[in-house]
């Protein structure tokens, strides 16, 4: 059954924090960043993960990018991450329970880091470069995906990984919902196909649609970096314990709600900062 995404009581409860909670009650999200001059997208994702309530968020970047990112980050922690071997070592800390890879990562770094990240079997969001890097040979990616992964392609990225499904959708042989459902079944994970009518499908055949039209319209999301924020929201929600499909649905709803709360003039940096107002309106 296809459902229209609304904020359920289960989702609302997952956004609350208890009076006796400490930061690690709400997870530790790791966001991977690329080289110098490419850190903005990852910083947007990290800020979103922190704003949505992850207890700890760390941005991991090459040593050469540390100073640049440190100049922009305060609440988000920062660590050097030279290679995938080091990333695997980080999984010794079981409190590290969610990852976000792709925004500003760069294709060469993505080709190395994505398999290392998936090896850890943590809740993982793959976006942007973490998808595009595998367009010429998606087999190695599909062979390592697992059911804790959420892929968040826009239509162009979807076409690079699922050219047959994208072609059938564009030709009118499949609708967007069926194309996304088949992609999730092939990948064995949750697939979120972005757009004003975002479709989210799990490998278990759960399907949800967020139609941002009418009173739910959020046209201000058509701005650079808004997708990076969405990836961070989903990673932060999974760090807090939401299952991948529910995290994708909740993140999509909050993403649009934050845009409506801010309104015209929105840029990507405004989305995380609009979330507290959305939470207050929800009573969480």
Image: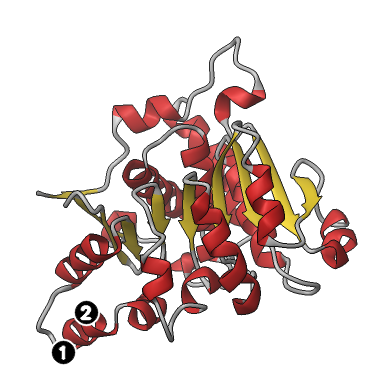
Residue 168, position as x, y percentages in the image: 17, 84
C-alpha distance separating marks 1 and 2: 10 Å
Q: Residue 97, how many percent across, how many down?
A: 55, 38
- What numbered label is drawn on residue 33? none
Residue at image coords 50%, 64%: 227
Q: Is residue 154 visible?
A: no
Q: Which mark is residue 165?
A: 2
Cβ atoms under marks 1 and 2 closer than 8 Å: no
Question: Residue 5: where, in percent of width, then height?
Answer: 26, 47
Residue 119 visible in the displayed image = yes
Read off the residue under disc 1.
Answer: 171
111 and 234: which one is in front?
111
**Residue lying at 9% horizontally and 83% vertically, measured from the top left:** 173
Marked residue nearer the N-terminal end (1 or 2): 2
Looking at the image, the residue that sits furthest to the top is: 20
- Left or right, 46 with respect to 197, comes to right
């Amino acid at each position: 059954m296809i459902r229209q995404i609304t904020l359920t009581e289960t989702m609302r409860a997952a956004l609350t924090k208890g009076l006796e909670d400490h930061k690690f009650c709400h997870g530790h999200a790791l966001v991977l960043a690329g080289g110098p001059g490419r850190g903005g997208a990852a910083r947007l994702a990290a800020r979103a993960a922190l704003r949505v309530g992850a207890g700890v968020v760390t941005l991991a970047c090459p040593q050469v990018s540390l100073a640049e990112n440190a100049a922009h980050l305060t609440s988000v922690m920062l660590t050097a991450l030279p290679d995938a071997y080091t990333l695997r070592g980080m999984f010794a800390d079981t409190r590290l329970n969610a990852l976000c890879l792709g925004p500003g990562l760069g294709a060469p770094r993505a080709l190395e880091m994505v398999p290392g990240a998936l090896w850890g079997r943590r809740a993982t969001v793959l976006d942007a470069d973490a998808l595009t890097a595998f367009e010429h040979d998606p087999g190695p990616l599909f062979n390592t995906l697992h059911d804790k992964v959420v892929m968040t392609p826009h239509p162009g990225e979807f076409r690079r990984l699922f050219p047959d499904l994208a072609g059938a959708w564009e030709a009118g042989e499949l609708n967007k919902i069926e194309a996304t459902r088949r992609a999730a079944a092939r990948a064995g994970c949750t697939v979120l196909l972005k757009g004003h009518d975002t479709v989210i499908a799990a490998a278990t055949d759960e399907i949800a649609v967020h139609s941002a039209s009418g009173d739910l319209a959020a046209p201000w999301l058509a701005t650079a970096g808004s997708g990076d924020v969405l990836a961070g929201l989903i990673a932060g929600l999974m760090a807090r314990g939401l299952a991948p499909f529910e995290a994708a649905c909740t993140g999509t709803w909050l993403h649009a709600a934050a845009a409506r709360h801010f309104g015209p003039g929105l840029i990507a940096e405004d989305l995380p900062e609009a979330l507290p107002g959305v939470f207050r309106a929800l009573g969480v």
